[in-house]
């Protein structure tokens, strides 16, 4: 019996659970096994809109942007990405509440530090008035269409166990992007498991190395739309929140300062009841990433539950 997902998207009926695998996956599925690209609308009446939205999201847009990037260059590609984000928002009928844009200098460059809830985070983040590039888990580069787009448009693969050469390449590429006036999105949690997952510290080192401010962004509600490839359900008419906080100058980046910001971001996320935050449940979610992500110590009970799971689970 697979993990229960009652309450995962708020109200769910029994048929929703059939969309999830009955055993923990060993990795992302192959193209033939990829259920996440075969979208199933929660409401049968929305089937056409959902299929069109999925086609725009994972087929048409990546191919169009790859061609544009090849023929017209980086700047035009970034404009098309923003058009794509608006199209996805309309097709999915997202109600996006954006606050804090007064903290963003459109001519500035930042390390953007958002909470991470799901793949719809990307079109929501493209509401920011910045040219963005993203750090992406390396296995996503193996996905059809999306992977080719990520590589063609210069997104940055992040390896779980990078070699020295990987790190040199990563820092050189990030530095080049920042030097061209682009901002780089770094998801500090490294996964979409939930608000309780602890921040990693790589962004601290990047900010100090490149002398670039960190722009904290609190995203909530996107997990209700499409949260993971193993959940092919797409839900329309969801409320999503994009809350931009004041940037942290590179000179103020320290372990203590970033820890305070992590707590502030998570407090704001949990307090948002209109667009609820994604919450982590190890019984339901842990096997996605082999229980290897640390839980924020502020969530002591959950930290202990994950530790018990790890004691009975082989972590790769």
Image: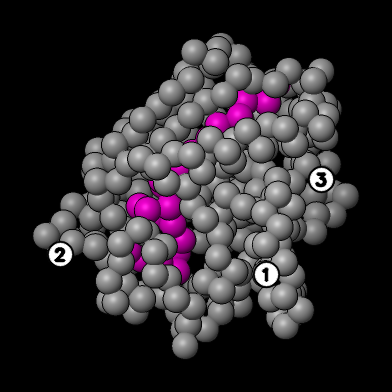
Between 98 and 38, the one nearer to me in the picture:
98
Between 170 and 208, the one nearer to me in the picture:
208
Residue 44: mark: 2
Quick one: label 1, few (<14), some, or many (20+) residues within 10 Å?
Answer: some
Determine which residue is flagged by label 1. 305
Residue 259: mark: none
As drawn, the residue found furthest toward the right would be 164
The correct choice, above or below, for 106 with respect to 47 in the image is above
| Figure quadrant of residue 208 | top right
Residue at 63 percent across and 67 percent down: it is 289
Whole-Å distance between the Cαs marked 3 and 1? Answer: 33 Å
Which quarter of the image is occupied by the C terminus?
bottom right
- Label 2 vs label 3, nearer the camera: 2
Which of the two labelled residues, at mark 2 and mark 3, occupies the earlier sequence position?
A: 2
**In the image: residue 140, left or right of residue 128:** right
| Figure quadrant of residue 88 | top left
Which of the two labelled residues, at mark 2 and mark 1, occupies the earlier sequence position?
A: 2
Magenta-colored span? 213-233
**SS category of the residue bearing label 2:** helix
Residue 167: mark: 3
Between 102 and 75, the one nearer to me in the picture:
102
As drawn, the residue found furthest toward the left would be 45
Residue at 62 percent across and 25 percent down: it is 215
**SS category of the residue bearing label 1:** helix
Which of the two labelled residues, at mark 3 and mark 1, occupies the earlier sequence position?
A: 3
Residue at 56 percent across and 54 percent down: it is 194
Task: Where is residue 9? Give x, y as percent.
Answer: 37, 59
Quick one: label 3, few (<14), some, or many (20+) residues within 10 Å?
Answer: some
Q: Magenta segment: does it hold 94?
A: no
Task: Where is residue 85? Give x, y as percent.
Answer: 36, 36
């Amino acid at each position: 019996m697979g993990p229960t997902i009652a309450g995962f998207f708020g109200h769910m009926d029994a048929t929703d659970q059939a969309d999830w695998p009955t055993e923990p996956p060993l990795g992302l599925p192959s193209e033939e096994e990829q259920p996440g690209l075969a979208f199933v609308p929660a409401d049968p009446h929305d089937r056409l809109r959902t299929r069109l939205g999925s086609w725009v999201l994972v087929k048409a847009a990546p191919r169009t942007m790859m061609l544009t990037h090849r023929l017209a260059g980086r700047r035009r590609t970034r404009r098309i990405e923003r058009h794509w984000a608006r199209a996805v928002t309309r097709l999915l009928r997202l109600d996006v509440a954006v606050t804090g844009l007064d903290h963003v200098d459109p001519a500035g460059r930042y390390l953007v530090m958002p909470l991470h809830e799901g793949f719809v985070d990307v079109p929501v983040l493209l509401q920011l008035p910045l040219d963005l590039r993203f750090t992406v888990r390396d296995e996503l580069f193996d996905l059809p269409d999306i992977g080719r787009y990520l590589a063609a448009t210069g997104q940055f693969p992040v390896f779980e166990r990078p070699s020295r050469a990987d790190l040199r390449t990563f820092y050189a590429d990030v530095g080049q992007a920042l030097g061209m006036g682009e901002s780089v999105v770094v998801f500090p949690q490294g996964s979409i498991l939930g608000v309780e997952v602890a921040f990693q510290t790589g962004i601290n080192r990047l900010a100090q190395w490149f002398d670039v401010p960190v722009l904290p962004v609190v995203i909530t509600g996107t997990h209700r739309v499409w949260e993971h490839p193993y959940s092919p359900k797409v839900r329309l008419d969801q409320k999503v929140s994009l809350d931009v906080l004041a940037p942290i100058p590179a000179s103020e980046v320290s372990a203590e300062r970033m820890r305070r910001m992590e707590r502030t971001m998570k407090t704001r996320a949990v307090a948002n009841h209109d667009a609820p935050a994604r919450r982590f449940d190890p019984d339901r979610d842990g096997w996605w990433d082999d229980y290897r992500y640390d839980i924020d110590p502020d969530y002591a009970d959950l930290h202990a539950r994950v530790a018990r799971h790890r004691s009975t689970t082989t972590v790769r």
